[in-house]
């Protein structure tokens, strides 16, 4: 299992109406993976960060240490391998 530093937890950029975002947060909660939720609808700066990270405005955008994932469901296998092994 990837050791997630509590000082630098996973970042997940979301909006409240995104079902893939809810799925990702539920997955992290079920696996007790610490994360910080950045709501792009509440703070435009978070949306700008997503654009800088990915060149797109797509949520969820998930940052695990130095890896950036756009979308959760389509990246679930790779994310699971990183977190669970």
Image (spheres, rainbow, N blue to C red):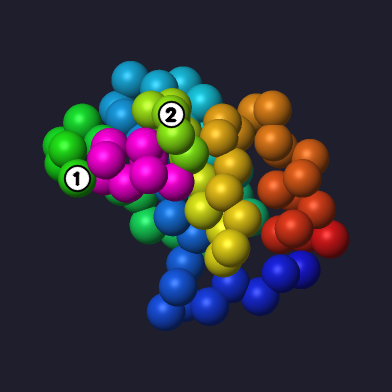
Q: Residues within 10 Å of mark 1 (few under 14, many from 20)?
A: few
Magenta span has 52? Answer: yes
Provide residue 69's location: percent of width, then percent of height. 59, 42
Q: Earlier in the sequence, mark 1 or mark 2?
A: 1
* Image quadrant where one finds the N terminus: bottom right
The residue lying toward the viewer, choosing from 78 and 16, is 78
* Image quadrant where one finds the C terminus: bottom right
- Total marks shown come to 2
Residue 12 is left or right of residue 69, and the answer is: left
Residue 81 is left or right of residue 50, and the answer is: right
Q: Which mark is residue 45?
A: 1
Provide residue 19's location: percent of width, then percent of height. 46, 21
Residue drawn at x 21%, y 31% is 41
- Asked if one can make out residue 25 in the rendered structure from this viewpoint, the answer is no
Residue behind mark 2:
56
Placement of 44 over or under 30, stated as above or below:
above
Quadrant of res 72: top right
Magenta span has 27? Answer: no
Placement of 65 over or under 53, stated as above or below:
below
- Asked if one can make out residue 11 in the rendered structure from this viewpoint, the answer is yes
Quadrant of res 3: bottom right
Placement of 49 over or under 73, stated as above or below:
below
Which segment is the magenta one? 46-53
Residue 73 is left or right of residue 62, and the answer is: right
Q: Which mark is residue 8?
A: none
The residue lying toward the viewer, choosing from 4 and 33, is 4
Residue drawn at x 57%, y 49% is 68
- Chief secondary structure of the magenta portion: helix
Residue drawn at x 51%, y 46% is 62
Give me the C-alpha separation between circle 1 and circle 2.
Answer: 14 Å
């Amino acid at each position: 299992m990837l050791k997630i530093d509590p000082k630098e937890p996973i970042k997940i950029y979301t909006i409240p109406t995104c079902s893939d975002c809810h799925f990702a947060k539920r997955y992290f909660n079920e696996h007790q993976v610490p994360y910080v939720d950045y709501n792009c609808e509440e703070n435009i700066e978070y949306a700008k960060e997503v654009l800088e990270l990915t060149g797109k405005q797509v949520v969820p955008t998930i940052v695990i240490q130095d890896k950036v994932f756009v979308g959760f469901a389509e990246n679930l296998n790779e994310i699971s391998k990183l977190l669970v092994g």
